[in-house]
Amino acid sequence: MRIKYIWLLVAACLLVSCDKFKNKDPETTPAVEKPAFDADSAFAFVKAQTDFGPRTPGSEAHSSCATYLKEQLAAFCDTVIVQPFTTTTYDGKKWSAQNIIGSFAPEKSKRVLLGAHWDSRPMADHDPDPAKRTQPIDGANDGASGVGVLLEVARQLQQKNPAIGVDIIFFDMEDYGTPSSENIPGDWWCLGAQYWTNHLHRPDYHADFGILLDMVGGENPTFYHEGFSSYYAQHIVSKVWGTAYRLGYGDYFINNGANPITDDHYYVIRNTGIRMIDIIHQDNKTGTGFGYVWHTTQDNISHIRKESLAAVGTTVLAVIYDEKE
């Protein structure tokens, strides 16, 4: 994903950023029942992906991880659909890819869409060592963390069914965008999401709203109101951040606006109209706007924290269980 510098939009997002829960006394704020979420299990799901190695298109790791994700979703979900597609990247190469979709209660009309990307960056173009910038990355946080959280969410939903239908999409080919040193016009990021939004797995598919997870397992993450999320779905941002606050995760979910990011949710919003928000770590202390290990060879399992996975996964589950049919 890349920061999309649309300053008027940023200004608008900052104006509508929600401070609803910022100054309230925790003792007077209604509590939220904390759902079960096993951080050890989520961490194991993250590690299982990184153990395959960099999950770049065309690699054995990519193929093996796809099989693993299908098997895991099949163990938890009511139905699993694999959506194969062929896509062309910025460098003119063609790749075989696949989105992997697991559904709970597919017959229910009221639905929530959850998503994360499962591929990893084929080049460490922000590595501090220039000699490593052409190497693929493990993508422990940038990719695997969101998938790991959603696999544990799926495991919990199997044990305690929600009142609504839930769809989990693992998008492929999110992170094969242009290198930082090149500026090639075109929509080269989030290719799996672009494909899905133009070829829905069910022609009549619709969700009431969606939540995307990206880089949610790092050290001391800060999740601000991402710009497109605020602009298009502030009511969902308020719902999720408010839930996180009441669960005690206010140090992670910060009630301030931040840059709009060209991530999978952007194409979901643009092409389907589904209001999907992005829980994504942004860091204003780094030159990239993301964490220090972003798009470097250091994005490995050693930097994943179970506390971060738990904060996000517990919040997502609480939001889902709060929804009524």
Image (cartoon, rainbow, N blue to C red):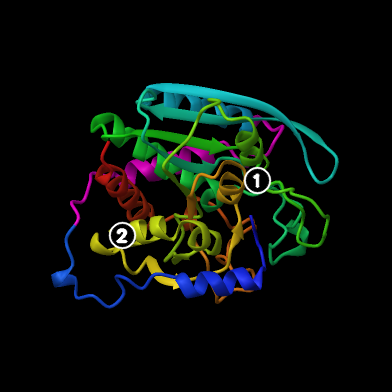
Rendered location of residue 250, percent (x, y): 32, 67
Question: What's under tag 1, amino acid-wise?
Answer: Cys
The crowd level at tag 1 (other Cα within 10 Å; few <14, some 14-19, many 20+) is many
Q: State the quadrant of the N terminus.
A: bottom right
Distance (Cα) linking label 1 and label 2: 27 Å
Magenta segment range?
32-60
Question: What's under tag 2, amino acid-wise?
Answer: Ala
Disc ID at residue 152 = none
For marks 1 and 2, the one nearer the N-term is 1
The crowd level at tag 2 (other Cα within 10 Å; few <14, some 14-19, many 20+) is many
Q: State the quadrant of the C terminus.
A: top left
Looking at the picture, does residue 73 appear above or below residue 52?
above
Quarter where residue 52 is shown: top right
Residue carrying label 1: 190
Residue carrying label 2: 244
Q: Is residue 258 left or right of residue 136?
A: left
Q: Residue at x 34, y 41 (%)?
A: 41
Q: Secondary structure beneath disc 2?
A: helix
